[in-house]
Each structure stands twice: as structure tokens, then as C-alpha cells.
Image (tube, helix red, strand yellow):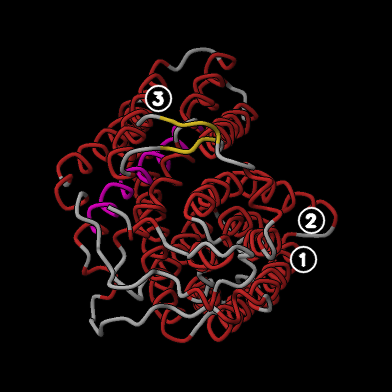
């Protein structure tokens, strides 16, 4: 995993490209409802006099519906284009949350139906943005830096989103915050689908197959690994709550989560500032191993200051691993399934995170906080072992018979260099 000189222009080179800043900002804004959904639902239910059990049930229903909807909508985007899917989905998702905000939790079947509607139609903006990067940026090295920038921007959203939600709740109410956050989500989706790259983007022709992107063995191997990365991250969330309770200082939880996000931010910035040699599959194995190794010291559970430092360390390789995984998805996605493939990564990671939270809860209750953090370390190591065991299929990327992006759709690329994704090189 050797490095060369810093990539030319860095992140500023990406953001100066026509449409790039708009697409990134619109996608982040459009994903705000999903990024803040669990917190928003908890605050809303408690404000309505509901229990934490009810809040957990609604969050679970929302999460399952999102997991089901993302790959289905991703496949629809590949077949029908972005505007015809992303905007209607964003509107329907917002209407689901608006229905909950306006009717409350008095009629539980209606409340559950509302969150299922919101989750099922959460637009696959994350996968859609990654599908657009080659047509916007042109050169392969710029696309790879954009993937790293995307991973860094996610950390910013997951930090700033809850702060914005808290501000809206303090100014108005949890119901009003739900409405405003979802209105912002629709505006973000609108900003994306009205852009020239989104309007002109077309997926490559695809082979009709009911499995879609899942017929790729390499993609299945990657998804299997990142299920356990998600599990590790979800268990850290629960274990951090238990750690804060043990210390008798609830605010420590916020510091630990912020520190993890800071570590991911720093790691992502450093990763994207370099041009990497070697195959991304091999690089991903190293990054996931380092991620697992950095989870292990959390079981020491030292004092809050030292624990905050360990939380920073635990996040350092998260964004680089995600950015590298995006490249691997692009290399292994069957022709014409790129949005669906990215959406499967989002879904698998999310399901793994939910299961990690579910596993860490009983582990903490039965054997203490250290066990909760041990689940994270175990999840990271299993993720590495999956990549190690599937090295053969990961080493054979799908070889499309044409460039991944047709040059006539490279709106705003601004360079005569032909557009090729990394999966075209061996």
C-alpha cells in the first residue's frame, strides 16, 4: 500500500469542478432526514409522552423499511434515471414523517405506517452521488478523491445534523423539527435532480437478472465484510452509553461520539490527500485490519480523557475504509447496476450497525461495559477475516466490455481525458 506524491489539487480541485459542490451539498442536505431519523423519532415520541420502547420500535421499523427500500430504489434509478426516482421518493418519505408529526402516536398502526413509508422511500442519494462522480470529474484519480471527500462529508453531516435538530427542537418543538428537517431533505434532493449531471446521467446497459448487483461474487464478499464493520460501529454506540453511565457523566457519551467522528474526519482528509498505488482490494484489507486493531484498545475503558483519545483513534481508519470500499464496489458492480450496488453497501452497513446495537445491549447487561467494546473489536476482526477468506473473488473485478461512463454524459468534466472507472484497469 505504497503512496506517491500528494494528489494534485486535493479536495479543492474536486469542489471547484462544475456541479461538484452543488451535488455534494445537495446530497448531504437530502440525506439529513435519514441521518437524524433515530434521534428525531426518539425526541418526538418522548415529547408525545411515549415510552423509549415505543421509540425503539418506530426506529426499528424505520430502519428495516430503509434497508428494504434502498437497493430497490437504487435499481429503479439505474433503470429509469435519477430525477424520475429520487425526487418522488424524497417527497413520499417527507410525507410519511409529516404524517407522523401531524397525527402523533395516539393511533399506533398509523404511526408505524408513517415511519415505514418514510423509510421505504428514503431516496438513494448516497449511491446516486457516487454514480455521478465519474461523469462530473472525468479522471479516475479525481473520482477516487471524491469518494474520500464523500466519506469525510458524511462525518460532518452526522455531527452537524443532530446539532441542527437539537436547535430546531429548542426553538420550536420535536414535531416542527421533523417537518423542517424533512423539508430540507426534499430541497436537497431537488438541488441534485435539477442539476445537469443528474438529468443527463444514464446507467450503462444492463443484463436482465433478478439478482441485479448481487450476482457479483466480489460485491457479496465486500458486503459480508462491511456488515461486520457496521456491527462494530453499532456496538460502540451502545457501549459508549454504558461507559458514560458507569462514570456518572452522561455528557461523556457525546464527547466519545464526537471524538470518533473527529478521528474519521482526520483519517479521511489524510487518505484523500494521497494518491495510492496497488489494487484497492488489497488496500482495503489493510485498512479494515487497522480499523479492527484500533477498536481493540477501547476494552481498556480508561478515564474519560484517555477514553476520548482512544475514540479518536478508533475512528481514524473508518472513512478511509469506506472510501476504499466505494472504489471496490465500482470495480465489482455488474454493468448497469452501479447505483443499486452502492445502495446495497449502505443497506448492509446499516443492518450491521442495527444488529451491533442489539447484540451490545445484552452483552453490556450480562458482562459489563468492557464486553460491549469487545463486540466492536470482534466485529472488526471478523470483517478483516471475511476479506481475507474471499481474496480470490475480490481479486477478480468485473471486466465491463465498455467504459463505465459514456463520455457524452460527462457533463462539466471539462477535460478531454476519457472517463474510465477503476474497474476498467487491471
Q: Does the magenta stretch mainly form a helix, a strand or a loop? A: helix
Residue range in magenta is 220-240
Task: Tell me the crowding category of disc 1: few under 14, some 14 to 19, or many 20 or more residues within 10 angstroms, Cα based.
Answer: some
Q: Where is residue 33 shown, x and y percent of the image? A: 62, 63
Task: Tell me the crowding category of disc 3: few under 14, some 14 to 19, or many 20 or more residues within 10 angstroms, Cα based.
Answer: many
Q: Which residue is mark 3?
A: 294
Instruction: Find the distance from the CA under tag 3 to the CA under tag 1.
Output: 40 Å
Q: Nearer the viewer, residue 68 or 196?
A: 196
Q: Which residue is mark 1?
A: 176
Q: Element at badge 3?
A: helix
Q: Where is residue 245 shown, x and y percent of the image? A: 53, 27
Q: Element at badge 1?
A: helix
Q: Quadrant of residue 291?
A: top left
Quarter of the image containing the N terminus?
Answer: top left
> From the viewer's perspective, is residue 354 above or below residue 307?
below
Residue at (35% x, 73% y) in the render: 337
Q: Where is residue 212 shown, x and y percent of the image? A: 28, 75
Residue at (38% x, 58% y) in the render: 345
Q: Nearer the viewer, residue 64 or 400?
A: 400
Instruction: Find the distance from the CA under tag 2 to the CA under tag 3.
Output: 35 Å
Q: Residue furthest front?
A: 416
Q: Which residue is mark 2?
A: 168
Question: Can residue 140 be found in the magenta stretch?
Answer: no
State left or right for residue 368 relative to residue 93. left
Of badges 3 and 1, the one in the foreground is 3
Q: Quadrant of residue 185?
A: bottom right
Amino acid at each position: 500500500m505504497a503512496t506517491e506524491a500528494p494528489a494534485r489539487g486535493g479536495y479543492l480541485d474536486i469542489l471547484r469542478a462544475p456541479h461538484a459542490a452543488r451535488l455534494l451539498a445537495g446530497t448531504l442536505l437530502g440525506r439529513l432526514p435519514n441521518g437524524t431519523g433515530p434521534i428525531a423519532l426518539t425526541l418526538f415520541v418522548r415529547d408525545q409522552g411515549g415510552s423509549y420502547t415505543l421509540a425503539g420500535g418506530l426506529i426499528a421499523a424505520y430502519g428495516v423499511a430503509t434497508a428494504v427500500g434502498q437497493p430497490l430504489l437504487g435499481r429503479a434509478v439505474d433503470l429509469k434515471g435519477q430525477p424520475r426516482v429520487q425526487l418522488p421518493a424524497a417527497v413520499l418519505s417527507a410525507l410519511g414523517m409529516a404524517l407522523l408529526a401531524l397525527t402523533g402516536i395516539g393511533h399506533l398502526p398509523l404511526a408505524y405506517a408513517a415511519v415505514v413509508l418514510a423509510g421505504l422511500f428514503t431516496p438513494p442519494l448516497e449511491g446516486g452521488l457516487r454514480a455521478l462522480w465519474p461523469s462530473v470529474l472525468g479522471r479516475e484519480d479525481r473520482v477516487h478523491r471524491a469518494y474520500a471527500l464523500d466519506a469525510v462529508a458524511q462525518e460532518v453531516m452526522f455531527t452537524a445534523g443532530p446539532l441542527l435538530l437539537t436547535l430546531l427542537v429548542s426553538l420550536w418543538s420535536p414535531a416542527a423539527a421533523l417537518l423542517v428537517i424533512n423539508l430540507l431533505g426534499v430541497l436537497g434532493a431537488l438541488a441534485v435532480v435539477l442539476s445537469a449531471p443528474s438529468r443527463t446521467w444514464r446507467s450503462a446497459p444492463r443484463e436482465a437478472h433478478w439478482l441485479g448487483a448481487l450476482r457479483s461474487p466480489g460485491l457479496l464478499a465486500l458486503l459480508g465484510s462491511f456488515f461486520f464493520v457496521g456491527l462494530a460501529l453499532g456496538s460502540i454506540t451502545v457501549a459508549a452509553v454504558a461507559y458514560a453511565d458507569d462514570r456518572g457523566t452522561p455528557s461523556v457519551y457525546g464527547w466519545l461520539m464526537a471524538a470518533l467522528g473527529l478521528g474519521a474526519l482526520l483519517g479521511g482528509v489524510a487518505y484523500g490527500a494521497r494518491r495510492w498505488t496497488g489494487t484497492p482490494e488489497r488496500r482495503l484489507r489493510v485498512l479494515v485490519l487497522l480499523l479492527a486493531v484500533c477498536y481493540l484498545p477501547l476494552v481498556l475503558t480508561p478515564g474519560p480523557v484517555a477514553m476520548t483519545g482512544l475514540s479518536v483513534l478508533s475512528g481514524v481508519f473508518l472513512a478511509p475504509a469506506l472510501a476504499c470500499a466505494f472504489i471496490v464496489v465500482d470495480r465489482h458492480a455488474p454493468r448497469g447496476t452501479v447505483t443499486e450496488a452502492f445502495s446495497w453497501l449502505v443497506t448492509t452497513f446499516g443492518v450491521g450497525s442495527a444488529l451491533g446495537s442489539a447484540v451490545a445491549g445484552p452483552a453490556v447487561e450480562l458482562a459489563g461495559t468492557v464486553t460491549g467494546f469487545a463486540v466492536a473489536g470482534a466485529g472488526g476482526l471478523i470483517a478483516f477475516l471475511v476479506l481475507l477468506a474471499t481474496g480470490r473473488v475480490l481479486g477478480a473485478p468485473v471486466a465491463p466490455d465498455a467504459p463505465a461512463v459514456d463520455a457524452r454524459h460527462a457533463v462539466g468534466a471539462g477535460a478531454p481525458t476519457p472517463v474510465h472507472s477503476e474497474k476498467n484497469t487491471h
